[in-house]
Amino acid sequence: MSIPKHQDMRLPLLEVSEDGDMHTLKECTEKLADSFQLTDEERNERLPKNKKRTRVYDRVYWAKTHLDVSGLIESLKRGEFRITEEGKRVLRQNLSKIDDAYLLKYAGYVAFLKRSGKKIISESDDSTSSFKELNTPLANDLLDKLKEMHFNLFEDSMLEFLFHIGYGVSKNSIKQNIIKTHDGGLDGYIELDTLGVDKIYIQAKRWDREPVRSQQIRDFSGAIDTQGGNKGIFITTSRFTPEARKCNEAIKNKSMRLIDGNELVKLMIESNFRF
């Protein structure tokens, strides 16, 4: 048989993790390849634009990503995850498939689609819908490179990126290496006017799979307060929990923009930013 699409791998992947133990993408890819009885040729087929990644691994990766943002599994660290209580509840429903329409019931999945710039497109061969991935191999590679950067270089690169997309009046308006507190702090700021009266403060977290939670949002808000500011951009290579986003929305005395890893690489690709 041909390699199943990632939509068809979601339920089998969730079933593999039903025991509640920690699992890895590599391990699950092998198990699903066995389950689908893939040939050696299918197991070793590479992506055309990313020869380091096999097609079956890429399908499992995206199945995991969609389950993760929907809250059916939780990521522990890079490539490692386990099922959540919601995931176990879904398995008890004895579904035949976890398709896009089913996942739309989860706010995290809907938010993921919006942040990633995905749109519903019609399939000519059936009545279902799927979401078109934009530059998937390029985005994956770029996000991996960002996660491998030294954290100081990542912080500086994010300030350069924000200047590249229009923040700041000149290169000299970028200010780096603000002294940080133990549990919060700021990674820099950009002056939005010639005299430096108006500033936007930056927090950049080069995290792998650990999500940004409400506490980090509150720390960021408090750090901006200590500087007398009211604007901020929080960038992470991972993601924000739904509670973190709600926390941000609840802060009314300042404007803070959250950019997760998926949105970050999309913006970098669209603006042709190089680091």
Image (spheres, rainbow, N blue to C red):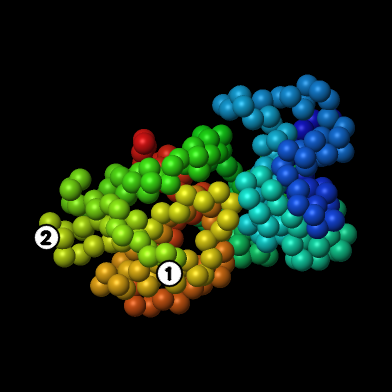
Residue drawn at x 24%, y 62% as measured from the top left: 199
Residue 81 location (% of width, % of height): 70, 52
Say what amino acid the circle numbered 1 marks: Asp
- Along the viewing direction, whichever of 16 and 110 lies nearer the viewer: 16
Q: Is residue 154 above or below residue 54?
A: below
Q: Residue furthest top?
A: 41
User: Regarding mark 2 in the picture, which secondary structure is present there?
Assistant: loop
Is residue 256 among the parts visible in the rendering? no
Mark 1 surroundings within 10 Å by alpha-carbon count, few (fewer than 14), some (14 through 19), many (20 or more): some
Report which residue position mark 2 lands on: 195
Cα distance in 3D space between marks 1 and 2 = 28 Å
- Residue 6, position in %: x, y? 71, 43
Residue 121, position in %: x, y?
Answer: 61, 46
- Which picture quadrant has residue 85? bottom right
Crowd rating for badge 2 (residues with CA inside 10 Å; few <14, some 14–19, many 20+): few
Is label 1 or label 2 in front? 1
Disc 1 to disc 2: CB gap under 8 Å: no
Residue displayed at 45% across by 54% down: 205
Query: Which type of secondary structure does the marked residue at label 1 adopt?
Result: helix
Looking at the rendering, in which quadrant would you find the N terminus?
top right
**Which residue lies at the image location 28% right of the left edge and 61% below the top edge?**
200
Residue 17, given in percent of the width and then of the height, sits at 80, 52
Residue lying at the far left of the rendered structure: 195
Q: Residue 219 — which label?
A: 1
247 with respect to 102 (left or right): left
N-term-proximal mark, 1 vs 2: 2
Q: Which mark is residue 68?
A: none
Identify the residue shown where x is 47% and y is 66%.
216
Q: Is residue 21 visible?
A: yes
Quadrant occupied by the C terminus: top left
**Residue 245 relative to residue 189: left or right:** right
